[in-house]
């Protein structure tokens, strides 16, 4: 299973959402039903068996960007549901990819992936490079969705910063401590080997309680 396509499915969380994300409070985040997958060939196509790749490519060959895709999604779901259970499980663990990556050629996805995987690039610089790449390589509906996504995240960041600035001194102190603990948690998770990380995620996904599942994988 290739790591590059898998990493791209969490691109939005790292490239834009992570930098603007609201921290998790003691009550846990509010959970909403996941949105339907975007129209287009799934970004994890290269990880599927060759026959499944061929069938899904055939399903979407005549699809026009912006059109409804209920039939194509239904046929794609039938193929995915027939895959081996372990492969289905690995696909279901991913958060959905951002809509503006839907239907892009592998060569374009690889350019985004190269920026994401380069750990020598500072986080803010990485966001700037992804922004520049999107404006340069995306077009039509994909570019429109990227611009909408970016505008939404910038608005959410502005709203969050305004609320944070208006906290009482006691609340600001607690918020800073929680942010530090959150940072330590993700640093610890990032330091684990993949097998240990997968074991923990499998455990947390079945954890009972009122707070729902853990945050998305990083």
Image: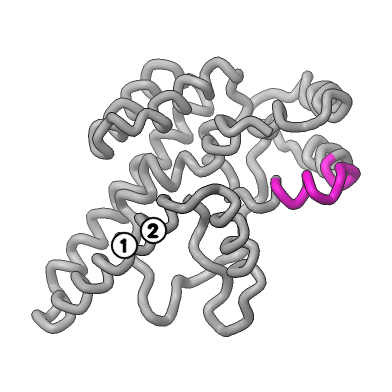
Note whether 70 is above or below 63 in the view shown: below
Horizontal side of 91 relative to 8 (left or right) equals right
Residue 156 in view of the camera: yes
Q: Nearer the viewer, residue 56 or 45?
A: 45
Left or right, 19 with reference to 104: left
User: What residue sits right under mark 1 in the picture?
Assistant: 184
Residue 52, image x, y percentages? 85, 30
Asked if marks 1 and 2 touch (Cβ < 8 Å), the reply is yes
Q: Position of residue 38 (x, y in %)?
A: 63, 40
Identify which residue, 137 or 24, lies in the foreground. 24
- Determine crowd level at label 1: few under 14, some 14-19, many 20+ residues with C-alpha closer than 10 A: few
Asked if residue 193 is positioned above or below residue 144 in the image, the reply reads below
- Name the residue rendered at 41%, 32% in the picture: 116
Q: How many marks?
A: 2
Quadrant showing the N terminus: top right
Q: Which residues are magenta?
A: 80-90
**Which corner quadrant of the image does residue 197 belong to?**
bottom right
| Left/right of residue 189 with respect to residue 204 in the rendered view | left
Residue located at (64% from left, 63% from top): 202
Q: Secondary structure at mark 2?
A: helix
Instruction: Give the alpha-carbon distance from disc 1 to disc 2, as whole Å.
Output: 6 Å
- Label 2 neighbourhood size at 10 Å, few (<14), some (14-19), many (20+)? few
Colour scheme: one colour
């Amino acid at each position: 299973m290739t790591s590059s396509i898998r990493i791209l499915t969490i691109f939005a969380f790292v490239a834009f959402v992570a930098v603007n994300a609201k921290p998790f409070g003691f009550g846990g985040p509010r959970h909403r039903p996941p949105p339907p997958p975007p129209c287009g060939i799934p970004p994890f196509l290269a990880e599927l068996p060759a026959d499944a790749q061929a069938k899904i490519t055939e399903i979407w060959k005549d699809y026009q960007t912006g059109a409804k895709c209920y039939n194509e999604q239904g046929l794609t779901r039938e193929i995915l549901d027939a895959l081996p259970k372990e492969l289905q499980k690995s696909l279901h663990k991913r958060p959905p990819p951002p809509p503006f990556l839907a239907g892009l050629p592998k060569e374009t996805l690889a350019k985004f992936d190269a920026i994401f995987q380069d750990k020598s690039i500072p986080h803010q610089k990485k966001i700037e490079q992804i922004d520049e790449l999107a404006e340069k390589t995306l077009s039509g509906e994909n570019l429109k969705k990227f611009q909408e996504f970016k505008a939404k995240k910038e608005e959410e960041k502005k709203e969050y910063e305004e609320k944070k600035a208006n906290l009482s001194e006691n609340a600001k102190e607690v918020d800073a401590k929680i942010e530090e603990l959150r940072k330590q948690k993700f640093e610890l998770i990032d330091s684990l080997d993949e097998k240990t990380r997968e074991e923990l995620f499998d455990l947390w996904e079945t954890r009972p309680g009122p707070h729902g599942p853990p945050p998305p994988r990083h």
